Amino acid sequence: MSVVRTIVFPALRLLVWAVIAVALVVLAFRGGTDTSDPGGPGAPTLDLGSPTVPVSRGTVANTVSVTGTVVADAAVPVKATAAGTVRRVLVAEGATVTAGQTLLEIRFEEELAPWPAPTPRATRRRPHAHRGCAPPR
């Protein structure tokens, strides 16, 4: 059985592939056995020749007519970076805007932390000790 596996089966496989290759070459270059009807029954005929056109001068017009509808993109919600009242709108309704463009001005009040009450020591007047300052006159 080892002779059959090592010699006979590979030889048969090679023979089958060779027959398939020869059949494909014959079909590709000879087109089959019947030479009277190359396309077969009912096959459409095709003329691949280029038409001959006399040369002349003229104007070439390339006009395209298209019908359609222009539709606006969906609205995008805009969020402000601060809470407050709108002072001024800088862009008209329906105008085209770009990324990063300022759309409106918002007035907002920022609450600051209260300053600590002055201590008695801080209210005393001291002579100027800052470098570069002239003493008071």
Image (tube, helix red, strand yellow):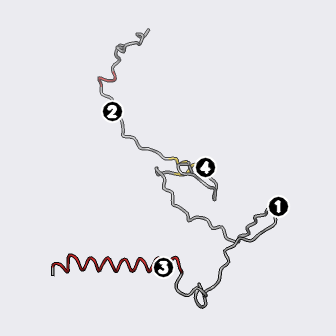
Q: Secondary structure at mark 4?
A: loop
Q: What mark, if any, has residue 77 been given in the picture?
A: none
Q: Secondary structure at mark 3?
A: helix
On the image, the x and y values in percent for residue 91 come to 62, 52
Q: Which residue is mark 3?
A: 26
Q: Give the label, 3 or 1, closer to the camera.
A: 3
Dots 3, 4 in contact, CB < 8 A? no
User: Left or right: 128 with respect to 68?
Assistant: left
Kind of residue indicated by mark 1: Thr
Q: What mark, if any, has residue 59 been given in the picture?
A: 1
Mark 3 or mark 4: which comes first in sequence? 3
Mark 1 or mark 4: which comes first in sequence? 1
Label 4 crowding class (10 Å Cα cut-off): few <14, some 14-19, many 20+?
few
On the image, the x and y values in percent for residue 17 come to 36, 77
Kind of residue indicated by mark 2: Ala
Separation of marks 2 and 1 at Cα, in angstroms: 90 Å
Mark 3 or mark 1: which comes first in sequence? 3
Which residue is nearer to you in this view: 89 or 112? Answer: 89
On the image, the x and y values in percent for residue 105 come to 55, 48
